[in-house]
Amino acid sequence: MSARALMFQGTGSDVGKSLIVAGLARALVARGHTVRPFKPQNMSNNAAVTADGGEIGRAQALQARAARVDPSVHMNPVLLKPQSETGAQVVVQGRMEGNARAADYQKMKPGLMPRVLESFGRMKGEADFVLVEGAGSAAEVNLRKGDIANMGFARAADVPVILIGDIDRGGVIASLVGTKAVVDPEDAALIAGFIVNRFRGDPALFADGMKHVAELTGWVPIGLVPHLPDAARLPAEDALALNAARERKAGARIRIAVPVLPHIANFDDLDPLEAEPEVELVRVKPGTALPGDADLILLPGSKATIADLSALRAAGFDIDIAAHVRRGGRVLGLCGGYQMLGRTISDPDGIEGPPAEVEGLGLLDIETRLTGDKKLVAVQGQTSDGVGFSGYEMHIGETSGPDTARAFATIDGQPEGAISADGLVAGTYTHGLFADDSQRAAWITRLGGAVSGLNYEAGVETALDALAAHLEAHLDIDALIRIAR
């Protein structure tokens, strides 16, 4: 079996590539096709564990779910996990292969193409269609040499391209037409059609806009996709989504404050809480104090725990958290956030940066040593109150200390995590905790709210079906099938 393939590139980051691929995967599966998602190179600290013990971008895991298949490391053969402004951890076919600064990675890319094409070949061998997602902007001609993420891959694999523009951010005609103007003519020849995403208002008002783009580029107009509010119920890949404005929830009885730090990771841990009608999730960036009326302060995961701990202190969040605990408020740390809650964090091997040992927040009597292989595993267990959960672990480091005797949870018969002597502060390495309905309900009850009965995972499935129906209504999917090769 060898699949048809079609690549979706964007005029920029966060134009909706990931969700359009997810929606099309579900739509094609509904038509009776077998589908595999594929992203040659992803840069994201939102990652998922695969059944074969590797990791890929969270968006590709969602796309696999949309295609009703298990995620595989070959769906995202190169994953870059930023650890600084200029460097990232490099994960190849699910396994960490080291760290590289941006300039060094540019030299690495040509050597990675054979493994990217190997993974692509595996996906083609399993399906009728492979839907390929590009990264960032197709117009980043400064990065074209050795490219494996966009046009470099499309040329190497001979895959036609559909270009996506986001009208919501303005200038969509210029960004689409401008892309053709700046890319290499041989690259431009691979672009067969275009999609305008996130339209608001009367579609008739942009009919001439679609016509102008088609005339100026020679590309087939595939469709004008109206903004879909239900898409917000699906996990976002790009950290840019953290900047989205959110209104205060009417009737919310629980406030959960989340400090947003530079290297926040696996922030989809927050999505199930935000879906709860009685929970107002407040994302707080440096420059603003954590709200004094928060019921819970949640410290999420981090790709660079020591650097983010420094950023937390620079923002004064450590003072806010200490005051919150003195008032009897609860704190929960997830993964890197758990590590920050302890007395010390040491990085003797320089995994995250120069070798160092730093003081933690001192809210848990534990210490963490960043060493050893990365742990990547799906887990099931129960918290200390006897409530079951499922999730996954994705971390480097070993944590020990007196407070681990009060384990947060038991996993496979072994204690995991820690709770302070007064019970107000807790930490765990488990991600995906709140996607478990029973575990989320227990926390809402503990914080004084009423359980809504929300089935989070069923809601994700409903949202994927709604996205597929939306794209069926507004895109020419038959044209996409004809274009694919």
Image (cartoon, helix red, strand yellow):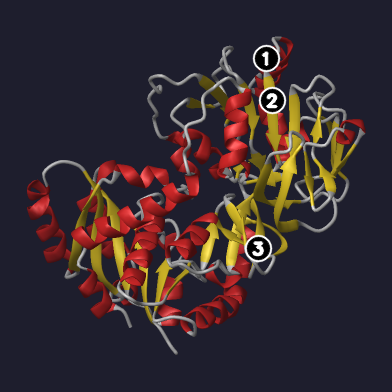
Viewer-proximal residue, 193 or 143? Answer: 193
Q: Name the amino acid type tagged 3.
A: Val
Q: Are marks 2 and 1 in contact (CB under 8 Å)?
A: yes
Dot 3 surroundings within 10 Å: few (below 14), some, or many (20 or more)? many
Q: Which residue is mark 2?
A: 331
Side of 60 relative to 385 (left or right) = left
List x then y, in percent, for residue 126.
Answer: 49, 82
Circle 1 — which element?
A: helix
Provide the secondary structure element on which disc 2 rests: strand
Of the 4 image quadrants, the one containing the C terminus is: bottom left
Return the residue nearer the eye: 111 or 265. 265
Which numbered mark, 2 or 3, is in the foreground of this view? 2
In this figure, which residue is indicated by the disc labeled 1? 324
Q: For the residues marked 2 and 3, what is the alpha-carbon distance in whole angstroms? A: 32 Å
Q: Which is more toward the observer, 142 or 275?
A: 275
Placement of 117 over or under 44, stated as above or below: below
> Could you say which quadrant of the image residue 71 lies in?
bottom right
Marking on residue 91: 3
Say what amino acid the circle numbered 1 marks. Answer: His
